[in-house]
Amino acid sequence: MNVQAYILSGIVESYVLGLASAEEQAEFEHMASRHPEVLQARLAFEIALEQQSKTHAILPPESLREEIRLRLFPAGQSGAITTQPATIKDLGDSHSAPVRRMNFWKYVAAASVVLLIGSVIWNITMITTTRDLGNEIKNRDLRITAIKQELDTTIKNLALVTNRPDLRMAVMKGLEIAPTAFATVYWDTTSHDVYLAAQNLPVPASDKQYQLWAIFKGKPVDLGVFDLKQDKLLIRAKNAQGAEAFAITLEKKGGSSQPKGAMYVMGKL
Amino acid sequence: MNPGITYSEPELVALLRQRTDQSFSYLYENYSAALLGVVGAIVSDQETARDVLQEVFVNIWRRIESYDPAKGRLFTWMLNIARNAAIDKIRSRGYQDSLKNKAIPDNNDSINGELGVMPRVDDVGLRKVLSTLKEDHRVLIELSYFQGYTQDEISRQLDIPLGTVKTRIRSALTHLRTLIK
């Protein structure tokens, strides 16, 4: 079988998207184990699919995380606490059986000792539980604050992209110098805003900065320099409408008027 | 929370198998939106889509032992769980009862018009890519990928020979690949 033709037959996508029949799957797995290029094609499509899915993500409402967490970690810790009062109650009930008077008082004494012990244990349990709960609440509060901050930034960033029907995007793929690098340019066809999401560029030396270019009729136009910051997903760039392509080069700090440094990523529209 | 930490897929799989709270948080932060996108492309109602997303997480949690890295990446595995859960939902009785027409749509117009099944059609995820396909190819991807019909069912319902269905789906898929890269 011609391996290249096999790869291009649509079987890779069929397999990855779960549309292949059982025989096709078996055949594909066999081919992938024998031909590295088949495996390579599968991985490439899978990665593209993941990136594509992340681009078209829908942010779930904040409450959903806790709902799901409760389903995955059902609360089972309260059981030990609730069993104790039940035991005491059972004992208390048993003295309603017909007994002689002398025995009755003995019973009361015994029952009160049991009640006392029970109550001591109960108190100790409660103190420990309260302390644990207190710590847990503190930890949760800290975590919630951290999550909120993270969410706020993410929502802000996302809102820039998702609330705009006129937004278009172009993916810039890594060139030879950094094959795994990629970055995405978003621009609004009505407001003319341009945003850059540089997700995967190598960290530059301290005297260098990345610079974004738009290509008009083969000529590069400076859209500004930017720094890579983890907490900032989207970087606002200068306006550029009607560009044919975008590219990022590594320039001396502060940028250049014309691209001089190496080109890291490039994407045509 | 450690917003800075990024796990490789094998690391994440190992953590998920221990079912730690931390692994859940990481999973949720990194994949919930992408997976809701996958579900949302199939299930139109937002409320229902969120219910399905819960099922997806429960399934990932329960079935992580059966994930086999030799067969595909973790995200692909999760994506297929999400797609299957979404299709199960739109085929469930409760969901079907809310739809008037249960028959498989026989032309493209009725697919778009099928309220509830086809939501805000062209703007979500793969669907957006789909909208650029040729008409006859598009219907087949719609039915097989988004509605989970087998090629056999499609061939019978649309009265197209099985071989043709197969070839068209394959050819539409190769086209998809060039579009999403």
Image (spheres, grey):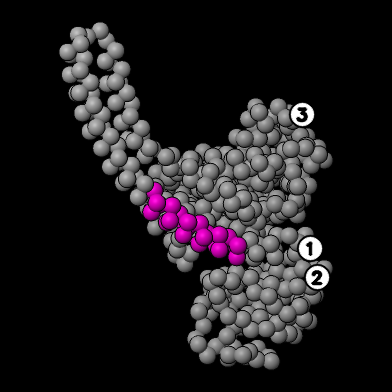
Residue displayed at 79% across by 63% down: A166
Would you place residue A240 above or below residue A107 in this image?
below
Which residue has dot 3 on it?
B101
Indicate the quadrant where residue A138 lies: bottom left
Q: CA distance from mark 2 to mark 3?
A: 42 Å
Q: Amino acid at mark 1?
A: Asp
Residue A149 on the magenta span: yes
Going 75% across and 73% down the picture, which residue do you hit?
A: A193
The residue labelled by disc 1 is: A166
Type of amino acid under label 2: Ser
Please say whether residue A85 is one of the residues in the magenta stretch. no
Query: Residue B45, percent across and down?
Result: 69, 41
Given residues A157 and B83, the one toward you in this image is A157
Amino acid on which disc 3 is placed: Asn
Image position of A239 (left or right of A101): right
Magenta stretch, residue numbers = A133-154
Residue A198 percent location from the top left of the image: 60, 72
